[in-house]
Structures are given as structure tokens and as C-alpha cells.
Image (cartoon, rainbow, N blue to C red):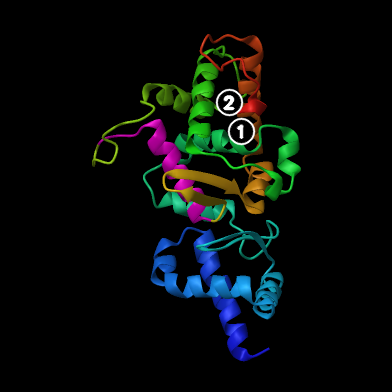
Amino acid sequence: MSVETIYEANRLIYLSLAYSSGRKRIVTQNSAEMTELVQRFQAEEAFRSAVDAGLRAMALRLLALDEGGLRLAACNADGFFAATLTDYGRLLARSDLKAADVLPVHCAVATAFFPTEADLDMPVEDLGAITMEDVIAILRRFAHAEAALPEEEDRLHPQVRSVARRLRELPEDNPDRLRAGAGNSWVDLVERVLEHLVETGYLLVFEETPGDVEYRPTPAYQTSMREGIVYSFHAFRDILADHAETGSSAEPGENDDVSTL
């Protein structure tokens, strides 16, 4: 195997890591090279073997082959390329969002990916994709469920309950949300959280057709939900399940099981 082949195989891995983590500038600047390398990956077995060897050496796995590049993720949450909660915290610190304000959104995203306990231990490639609309639907259910909780309910931290009350006061969408100073909406919060999760490598974003955006989890994200915010996540999901069982809301879909979302 020539040095040039090894170099180009590693270039494909490098550019694909940028592609998988949403580094649009790097991808755009190198789009022609990426297209050529992907075509070579598809056509040449020797080149594909070189890329596979590089992925194994870096503890990466190939999740999917797109026209735009290889969809890559760390093989496990302890890998060098796996995102951590610290990485996400640093990203959050650079924005005007507070952790408590977006915790219910994170729990809604996690509930969409892991509606049952068993999903937290399933291979990520066996889990389905979610959309922003899925997260909004779960937030809608949570807002109604939290409002029905008695004041003495202690499964949620008081700060999270305060956030839930503020959430109910926000519009689900704001037609002027792209205008400076327009304020937050549910769509705005969910969009920013999803963007952060993609930027840190927790989620992978797919857009097979323009405007039809889907998100898939990585092993690092699954582990963070299992070990990082596990208490809040389970409390959030349990409250949704309890509310569904009581049938206390008359809104369509409120009596559906959480696992159907």
C-alpha cells in the first residue's frame, strides 16, 4: 500500500469526522475532495480496506455512507472521539442558554430516542431517527403533565418545575424568531439544543430531502443519557407515563403510551 493511499484514506476519515460533527465550513471548503474520496471508497476495495483499518485504529465505526461523506461515531463512550458532558457544558457556556432552562428539552429529546428502559442498552444503529416535531410533541405532553402534578410532587427539581411553568408561557413557534430580539419559542429552544448536540458529536443529522431533517444518536449520547442526567431523564419519562395512564388531559394523543412517541 502506497504512502499516498494511506494519506488519502486518512483524509477521508478526517473530512468525514468533520461531516459527522456538523463542521459545515470544513466540509464546504473541501467538498470536491470529499466527493472524489467517497467515490474512490465505493469503487476501490484496496482503498476501502485502508479506510477500514484507519477507522479500527481510531476506535471509530462507520454508521452510514452518504453522498456527503462517511457517517462516523466513536465505538464507545470512552473513545478519544466520543463527546462528553464536559464538551457539551463548554459549548453551552458560550451561549445565552442556562442548563436548567434546556434540561426539559434534553429530556424530551432523550425520551424520543429512548422511550423504554431497554432502549438505553440497545445498539444505537437499531434505534430510530427523530425529528424536531417528535420533540415538540413530547414537550407538549410534558407541559400538560407537569401542570397536573400536585405541589408536593418532588420527582422534579424545583428549578425544573419553574422552567416547565415558563415553558408553558412560551409560544410553540414564533414567526418572527429569526428577527433579533424576537424572544424564545419551543421551536427555537429545541432547534438550538439539537444544533448543540450535533456540534458536540452527540447526534448525527441527516437531510435526505431538503427540509426533511432527522437526527440519530451516537454511542456517546446513549451513554450520557444512561449515566449523566439519568435521574432527571427517568423522572421526566415517568411523569409522562403516569399522565398517560390517568388520562387527565382531553387533548388528542394525550392517552397514548410514551413508547409510541
* Vertical comparison of 90 with 134: above or below: below
In the image, residue 165 lies at what x, y percent? 44, 22
In the image, residue 236 lies at what x, y percent? 60, 28
Lower position in the chain sequence, tag 2 or tag 1: 2
What residue is drawn where x is 54% and y is 10%? 249
Q: Which residue is mark 2?
A: 156
Q: Name the quadrant of the C terminus.
A: top right
Disc 2 marks a residue whose amino acid type is Leu
Disc 1 marks a residue whose amino acid type is Ser
Label 1 crowding class (10 Å Cα cut-off): few <14, some 14-19, many 20+? some
| 185 part of magenta stretch | yes
Residue stretch rendered in magenta on the structure: 182-200
Q: Main secondary structure of the magenta part?
A: helix
Q: Name the quadrant of the N terminus.
A: bottom right
Residue that lies at the very extreme toward the bottom in this rendered image: 2
What residue is drawn where x is 54% and y is 60%? 20
Alpha carbon separation for disc pair 2 and 1? 7 Å
Residue that lies at the very extreme toward the front in this rendered image: 43
For mark 1, give the secondary structure: helix
Is there CB contact under 8 Å for labels 2 and 1? yes
**Which label is found at residue 232?**
1
Whether residue 183 sits left or right of residue 95 in the image: it is left
Q: Nearer the viewer, residue 181 or 119?
A: 119
In the image, residue 179 lies at what x, y percent? 24, 40
| Quarter holding residue 2 | bottom right
For mark 2, give the secondary structure: loop
